[in-house]
């Protein structure tokens, strides 16, 4: 079992399988993209399988596959199939922009991979295209509805962006009213590849909640699991729920149970901090398994207590992009 230096149990790995993406969401990347790492500096699928096995051996029981866009990797299903064979791994989930998932929905269902987070920051097509800088709305919406209809546990990630999509906050709740889905509103974080910088946000979780409850006064707070990053609510008469994720306000650090590994091997113990180490050459060296286990123990034993403490490691504004960190 992995216990960090603040006595938090770490059982949740967010594994980025690529830094590439077919969208260019303006809160995530500049329009020209970022300096993507060379192919041979990304873990191969075999390496990702080996890494996952080592991590599960160390006590990880939940893995979320993220990126970049995970389905940009043509061999993603090879990894997913292998993950379903791992004893001790109880929860496999995926975060996706839902542009490319269509052909894989049937197999995901057969494999029992049910937890899919879909990023959708607008229900107005023009707004979606402005934010993502790509013309993929119909595909994303079609795949989203299909995933819901097929019985997946779908959560929608909607980042509330000032002057961009706040007019869609209530509309998406209305649109999803009869669907069994959770719409999670996230605060924007300053990880956009340096394309814009900020030290504060106006649409924090309190403001988002006030905006929603003004329109829907009959809103009840739900009990959430202790390690949940979202504060969850139900609107009377709605089939699904909604959640608020204080990703910039960082109210949830005290119960953080997660570790991140980027597609190029960076071990990240807090989104707001610097990578603790890189595992790529360790994975490709001698005694990889033992060495990785030792590095992971070191990383987990040296975690910052909060995202604010971690942020203090940076002297200037963030210039990294969520497409390399995995969200
Ligand atoms: N491409 C996939 C997707 O968009 O769902 C997976 C990778 S994406 C980096 C993972 C999550 O990070 C998405 O839900 C995305 O909305 C979120 N994200 C990206 N940039 C962000 C930012 N600057 N602030 C908050 N969340 C961000
Ligand atoms: Fe791609 Fe996801 Fe980043 Fe959008 S948020 S650019 S879909 S990695």
Image: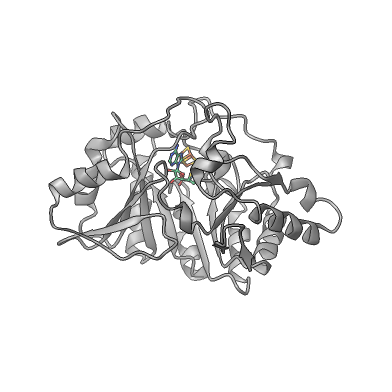
On the image, the x and y values in percent for residue 213 come to: 17, 49
Q: Could you tell me residue 34's position as x and y percent?
A: 57, 29
Q: Position of residue 109 (x, y in %)?
A: 46, 67
Rendered image coloring scheme:
one colour
Question: In the depicted view, which residue is nearer to us: 277 or 279?
Answer: 277
Q: Quadrant of residue 248?
A: top left
In the rendered image, is residue 24 in sight?
yes
Estimate the x, y position of residue 245 in percent, counting from the top left.
Answer: 37, 49
| The quadrant where residue 82 appears | bottom right
- Determine whether, in the image, residue 20 is placed left or right of residue 161: right
Rendered image quadrant of residue 139:
top left
Q: Is residue 21 visible?
A: no
Q: Is residue 267 left or right of residue 291?
A: left
Residue positioned 63% across, 64% down in the render: 2
Residue at the extreme bottom: 87
In the depicted structure, whether residue 81 falls above or below residue 39: below
How many numbered circles are shown?
0
Residue at left 19%, top 50%?
174
In the depicted view, which residue is nearer to us: 142 or 34?
34
What residue is rendered at 55% in x and 36% in y? 312
Above/below status of 309 relative to 148: above
Quarter holding the N terminus is bottom right
Asked if residue 129 lies left or right of residue 5, the reply is left
């Amino acid at each position: 079992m992995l216990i960090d230096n603040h006595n938090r149990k770490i059982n949740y790995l967010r594994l980025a399988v690529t830094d590439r993406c077919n969208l260019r969401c303006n809160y995530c990347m500049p329009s020209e993209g970022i300096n993507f790492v060379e192919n041979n500096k990304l873990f191969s699928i075999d390496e990702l399988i080996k890494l996952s096995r080592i991590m599960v051996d160390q006590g990880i029981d939940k893995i979320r596959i993220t990126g970049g866009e995970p389905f940009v990797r043509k061999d993603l299903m090879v990894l997913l199939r292998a993950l379903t064979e791992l004893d001790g791994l109880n929860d496999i989930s995926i975060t996706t922009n839902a542009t490319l998932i269509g052909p894989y929905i049937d197999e995901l269902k057969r494999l029992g991979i049910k937890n899919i987070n879909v990023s959708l920051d607008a229900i107005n097509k023009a707004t979606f295209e402005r934010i993502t800088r790509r013309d993929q709305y119909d595909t994303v919406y079609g795949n989203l509805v299909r995933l819901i209809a097929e019985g997946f546990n779908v959560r929608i990630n909607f980042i509330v962006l000032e002057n961009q999509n706040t007019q869609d906050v209530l509309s998406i709740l209305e649109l999803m009213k009869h669907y069994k889905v959770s719409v999670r509103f996230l605060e924007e974080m300053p990880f956009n590849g340096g394309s814009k910088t900020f030290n504060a946000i106006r649409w924090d979780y309190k403001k988002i909640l006030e905006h929603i409850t003004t329109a829907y006064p009959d809103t009840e707070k739900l009990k959430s699991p202790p390690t949940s990053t979202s504060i969850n609510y139900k609107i009377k008469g709605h089939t699904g729920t909604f959640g608020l994720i204080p990703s910039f306000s960082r109210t949830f650090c005290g119960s953080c149970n997660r570790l991140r590994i980027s597609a190029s091997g960076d071990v990240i113990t807090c989104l707001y901090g610097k990578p603790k180490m890189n595992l790529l050459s360790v994975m490709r060296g001698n005694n990889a398994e033992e060495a990785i286990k030792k590095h992971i123990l070191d990383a987990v034993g040296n975690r910052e207590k909060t995202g604010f403490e971690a942020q203090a490691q940076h002297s200037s504004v963030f210039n990294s992009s969520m497409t390399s960190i995995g969200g």
